[in-house]
Image (cartoon, coloured by chain):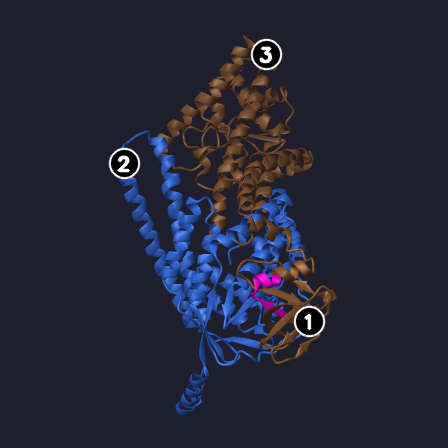
């Protein structure tokens, strides 16, 4: 951004400062409440052979949105389970095609893979449209205006470029994705804009690289010290200790590295993205810190030792932390006007979700 | 006349209007605090299903919505208008039902894992036409070939073995490859293809021992173990995707753990089935089942020797594994797989002995 003149911009800033008020976000959900919803969702999903999963998803999202407050009012999730079910059926069909194609012939496997890759930008756009237009606050729906064709450079070309350049181009791809996404969201008819810069994303790239090395070194030290410890305690049966080591040391270390790096990446991305969003003169501010990484690590540990049963509390803790660390510098929240929205299919969203398992962009 | 307080959002602008919803047995009315009556249509009245902590959203068919956090008020409204809060909500509210749900979920997941998925896979595997199986075998063989060398056994010897095997069963294709570091091994690649490593052929001291291995692999082929594994992993993939829709990446990593342990357990059960099949066939052919035990022990010894040389790479056959490694070469997920892909050799030898005792 280029300032037109020092005095002019100061004037604008001071006017903005006078008018803004800090509106915090807050999450009121409770782990015990979400546990009830989660376990009943799981039960009904199994009993209906997966059909209920669409209703389960809506119920979960309604719970999280309905317990998220901004400036005195809660968010709303309004999607129809039937739309999600349709998307899910298509996603399962695609998932099955994807997992069988490789057995029929190597070529069929690659063709299916390439087709899915080519469709990713379409899924991303559909997903953004579906999710945003089914989210609302104060009775006004959000929306997403990005087109399918516009999505190809940020969601396919630039990530591939990032991979082809051995990761050096990846921060640029993140930047392009951010530009595409956060300049096309809207609340009612008001578009959001993002002022995040390429530098910011390269900063994250370097941060990730450094923290990845640190975390891996830490994990290696851990493995070695545990190995030394077990060797000291008793030689025992060598084969048994190799197995025990695999269960108790290698897998947790891998998980530790994976969860730490993922959490560090998320924390940095959230901070950069949130701190640069503006909508109708209102700006987001985020104070997410290293605490987030510790929170994710402790969540992961507790989910592991409870064989998954801590998940509802983990999800609630995570959202509560995020919401406690986001603030809206609000200027005017009463005059957003709703727009007319087209009907959006759930396909993209659900297919994108189903393939999260296999494709890691 | 009952009423609840809340906020009316007209759906046009992001400004709420404090309002009251009033109702009786016959009529519903909405009045904002500014005194503005909003026309509401009782026919189209919809009340969102209750969720703890989240406000209730009431709509009347139009763009606008009335939102209230007054739970007891809304309960009364539901009662008067005979609105159903939904089954999920009713179950969630009762602690004993929640506990029962948790127990049921655990029981059903275990049931699916140990019985449902295997039974479904076994049934589906039998429906796969042989041509498709042959195609799958070709793909798996070409993937394996990336790590293997062409056989260096004389073609006459190979033909002799092939004729010998086929005189005892009718699998279409028998392949030989030099396996290098993988050592003595045999694999089943579908209903119509079995591959032997040169090292295995050299390790055996009699053709009967090789026939025993062939019968074991034929068991995998006949029982459609490769096809079953393909269906099992697909079923797991779909199940986990549906169940963990919003757990996130770390959660998926966690559910991957029981998945790989489960697949390894599957494969142990397949090995036992194939051993039983091989013993039956050996008895049928008037040969001693001990040939199987002998070759299993030789395989174990050969892999232990090999491990000493290589100082155990920790992947695949970790010493104890006899060579009859089968389908999971293409479907392995985690370093934990090797823990249990085959039952221990002593157990398998003991099984053969017990069958011997039966005949005597």
Where is residue A317, by image quadrant? bottom left
Please give the letter of the chain rendered in blue: A
Residue under pointer 1: B29
Circle 1 sits in a helix, a strand or a loop, which is it? strand
Circle 2 sits in a helix, a strand or a loop, which is it? helix
Q: Is residue A272 left or right of residue A183?
A: left
Where is residue B23, by image quadrant? bottom right
Rendered view: B122 above or below B14: above
Q: Dividing the image into 4 quarters, which one contains the N terminus of chain A?
A: bottom left
Q: Chain of mark 2?
A: A
Q: Position of residue A15 (x, y in %)?
A: 44, 87
Q: Position of residue B39 (x, y in %)?
A: 71, 74
Q: Are marks 2 and 1 in contact (CB under 8 Å)?
A: no
For discs 3 and 1, the disc positioned in front in the rendered view: 1
Q: State the CA–CA distance, disc 3 to disc 1.
A: 90 Å
Q: Nearer the viewer, residue B16 or B322?
A: B16
Rendered view: A122 above or below A219: below
User: Is tag 3's residue or tag 1's residue first in the polypeptide sequence?
Assistant: 1
Residue under the point 50% across and 45% down: B255
Discs 3, 2: same chain: no
Q: Is residue A86 visible?
A: yes
Q: Chain of mark 3?
A: B
For discs 3 and 2, the disc positioned in front in the rendered view: 2
Rendered view: B158 above or below A219: above
Q: Is residue A95 left or right of residue B144?
A: right
Circle 3 sits in a helix, a strand or a loop, which is it? loop
**Dot 1: few (<14), some (14–19), or many (≥20) neighbours within 10 Å?**
some
The segment highlighted magenta reads B66-74
Query: Drawn colour of chain B?
Result: brown
Residue under pointer 2: A231
Mark seen at residue B286: 3
């Amino acid at each position: 951004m280029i300032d037109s003149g020092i005095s002019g911009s100061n004037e604008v800033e001071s006017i903005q400062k006078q008018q803004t008020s800090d509106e915090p976000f807050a999450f009121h959900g409770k782990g015990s409440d979400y546990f009830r919803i989660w376990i009943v969702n799981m039960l009904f999903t199994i009993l209906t052979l997966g059909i209920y999963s669409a209703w389960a998803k809506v119920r979960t999202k309604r719970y999280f949105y309905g317990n998220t407050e901004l400036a005195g009012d809660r968010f709303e999730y309004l999607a129809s389970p039937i739309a999600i079910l349709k998307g899910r059926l298509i996603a399962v069909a695609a998932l099955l095609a994807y997992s069988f194609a490789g057995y029929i012939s190597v070529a069929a496997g690659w063709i299916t893979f390439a087709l899915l890759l080519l469709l990713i930008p379409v899924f991303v756009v559909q997903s953004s449209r579906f999710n945003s237009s089914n989210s609302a606050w104060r009775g006004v729906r959000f929306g997403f205006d990005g087109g399918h064709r516009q999505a190809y450079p940020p969601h396919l070309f630039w990530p591939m470029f990032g991979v082809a350049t051995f990761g050096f181009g990846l921060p640029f791809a993140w930047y392009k994705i951010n530009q595409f996404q956060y300049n096309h969201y809207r609340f009612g008819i008001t578009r959001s804009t993002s002022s995040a810069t390429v530098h910011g994303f390269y900063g994250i790239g370097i941060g990730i690289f450094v923290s990845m090395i640190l975390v891996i070194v830490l994990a290696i030290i851990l493995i070695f010290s545990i190995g030394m410890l077990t060797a000291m305690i008793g030689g025992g049966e060598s084969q048994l200790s190799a197995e025990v080591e695999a269960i108790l040391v290698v897998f947790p270390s891998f998980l530790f590295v994976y969860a730490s790096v993922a959490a560090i990446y998320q924390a940095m991305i959230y901070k950069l993205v949130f701190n640069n969003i503006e909508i109708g003169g209102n700006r987001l501010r985020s104070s997410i810190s290293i605490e987030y990484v510790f929170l994710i690590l402790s969540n992961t540990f507790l989910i592991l030792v409870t064989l998954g049963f801590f998940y509802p509390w983990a999800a609630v803790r995570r959202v509560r932390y995020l919401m406690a660390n986001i603030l809206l510098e609000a200027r005017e929240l009463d005059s957003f006007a709703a727009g007319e929205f087209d009907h959006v299919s759930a396909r993209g969203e659900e297919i994108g979700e189903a393939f999260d398992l296999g494709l890691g962009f | 006349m009952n009423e609840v307080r809340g906020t009316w959002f007209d759906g046009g602008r992001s400004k709420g209007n404090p309002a009251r919803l009033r109702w009786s047995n016959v009529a519903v009315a909405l009045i904002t605090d500014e005194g503005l009556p909003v026309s509401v249509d009782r026919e189209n009245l919809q009340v969102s299903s209750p969720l703890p902590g989240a406000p209730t959203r009431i709509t009347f068919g139009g763009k606008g919505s009335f939102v209230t956090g007054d739970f007891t008020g809304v309960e009364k409204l539901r009662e008067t208008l005979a609105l159903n809060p939904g089954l999920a909500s009713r179950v969630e509210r009762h602690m004993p039902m929640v506990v029962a749900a948790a127990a049921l979920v655990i029981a059903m997941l275990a049931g699916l894992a140990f019985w449902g998925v295997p039974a479904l896979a076994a049934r589906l595997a039998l429906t796969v036409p042989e041509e498709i199986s042959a195609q799958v075998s070709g793909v798996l063989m070409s993937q394996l070939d990336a790590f293997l060398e062409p056989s260096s056994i004389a073609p006459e010897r190979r033909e002799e073995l092939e004729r010998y095997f086929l005189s005892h069963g009718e699998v279409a294709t028998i392949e030989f490859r030099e396996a290098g570091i993988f050592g003595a091994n045999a694999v089943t690649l579908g209903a119509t293809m079995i591959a032997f490593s040169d090292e295995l052929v050299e390790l055996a001291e009699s053709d009967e021992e090789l026939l025993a291995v062939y019968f074991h692999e034929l068991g995998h082929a006949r029982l459609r173990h490769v096809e079953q594994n393909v269906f099992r992993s697909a079923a797991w993939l779909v199940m986990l995707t549906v169940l963990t829709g919003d757990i996130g990446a770390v959660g998926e990593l966690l559910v991957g753990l029981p998945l790989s342990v489960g697949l390894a357990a599957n494969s142990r059960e397949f090995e036992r089935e194939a051993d039983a099949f091989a013993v039956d066939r050996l008895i049928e052919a008037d040969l001693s089942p001990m040939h199987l035990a002998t070759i299993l022990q030789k395989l174990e010894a050969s892999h232990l020797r090999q491990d000493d040389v290589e100082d155990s790479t920790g992947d695949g056959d970790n010493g104890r594994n006899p060579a009859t490694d089968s389908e999971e070469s293409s479907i392995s997920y985690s370093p934990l797989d090797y823990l249990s892909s085959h039952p221990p050799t002593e157990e398998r030898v003991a099984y053969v002995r017990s069958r011997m005792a039966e005949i005597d």
